[in-house]
Image (tube, helix red, strand yellow):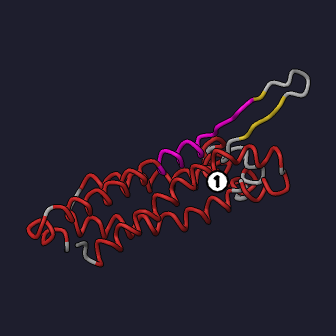
């Protein structure tokens, strides 16, 4: 029988997996939302929306990774979760940081609104699809912020999965394993 603590841990990790996969789905369908519903697409794919999603995903990851580490002492899970969270943070911040890197530190000091103006079109944070009207060819742009966020999300999914597997291992291990899993 699983303890209440293990059940809670597994439920939080399951919620974390759903949230991380939800981020990836958001990222992958963003170009089509922008293309077919431009008014909604502007909200769907804005850097502020990514920030709000991160503000949900990252606390869940932090809570589950620290609880999971205390219960199971699996360093690889904690490390993978930390790396994944770092990539999500970098991907979230990238639209604001990229123009500063491109222009150099001196330009950023001269124009403090440089980072903010780069985030208004969302071309450097979200995937975009353009269609050439003459040829009908589709062009898919997948900017670095999207790659960083998706890699981070995969890391978080892997860490959540590791926590779930560890809880199931504790459940199957009998009393001696359970005593080491209930920290």
Q: Quadrant of residue 140?
A: top right
Task: Please provide percent x and percent y for residue 144.
Answer: 59, 41
* Farthest bottom residue in view: 4
Bin the neighbour count of mark 1 within 10 Å (Cα to Cα): few under 14, some 14-19, many 20 and up: many
Residue at 46% across, 69% down: 59
Residue pictured at 48% horizontal, 44% vertical:
151
Residue most extreme to the right: 134
Give me the residue at 13% from left, 68% from top.
180
The x, y position of residue 6, in whole percent, is 29, 71
**Quarter the C terminus occupies:** bottom left
Q: Is residue 89 left or right of residue 105?
A: left
Quarter of the figure that contains the N terminus: bottom left
- Is residue 134 among what the camera can see? yes
Label 1: element kind: helix
User: Can the viewer see residue 111 in this picture?
Assistant: no
Taking depth in this image into account, of 136 and 122 the one nearest to the observer is 136
Instruction: Tell me how many marks there are.
Output: 1
Residue 104 picture location, percent across and down: 62, 44
Q: Main secondary structure of the magenta part?
A: helix
Which of these two is toward me, 82 or 169?
A: 169
Q: Residue furthest left?
A: 176
Look at the image and give the residue range highlighted in magenta: 139-153
Q: Is residue 103 above or below residue 88?
A: above
Q: Is residue 152 magenta?
A: yes
Q: Judge whether 183 appears above or below 126 on screen.
A: below
List the residue tagged with mark 1.
96
Magenta includes 16? no
Foreground residue, 93 or 165? 165
């Amino acid at each position: 029988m699983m303890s209440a603590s293990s059940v809670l841990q597994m439920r939080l990790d399951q919620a974390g997996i759903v949230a991380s996969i939800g981020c990836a789905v958001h990222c992958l369908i963003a170009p089509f939302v922008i293309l077919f519903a431009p008014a909604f697409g502007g909200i769907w794919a804005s850097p502020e929306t990514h920030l709000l999603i991160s503000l949900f995903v990252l606390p869940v990851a932090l809570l589950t990774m620290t609880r999971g580490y205390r219960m199971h002492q699996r360093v690889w899970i904690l490390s993978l979760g930390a790396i994944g969270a770092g990539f999500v943070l970098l991907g979230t911040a990238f639209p604001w940081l990229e123009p500063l890197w491109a222009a150099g530190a001196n330009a950023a000091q001269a124009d403090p609104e440089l980072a903010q103006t780069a985030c208004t079109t969302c071309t450097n944070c979200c995937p975009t699809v353009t269609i050439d009207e003459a040829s009908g060819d589709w062009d898919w742009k997948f900017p670095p912020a999207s790659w960083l966020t998706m890699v981070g999300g995969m890391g978080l999914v892997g860490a959540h999965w590791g926590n779930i597997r560890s809880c199931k291992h504790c459940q199957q291990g009998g009393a001696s394993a359970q005593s080491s899993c209930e920290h």
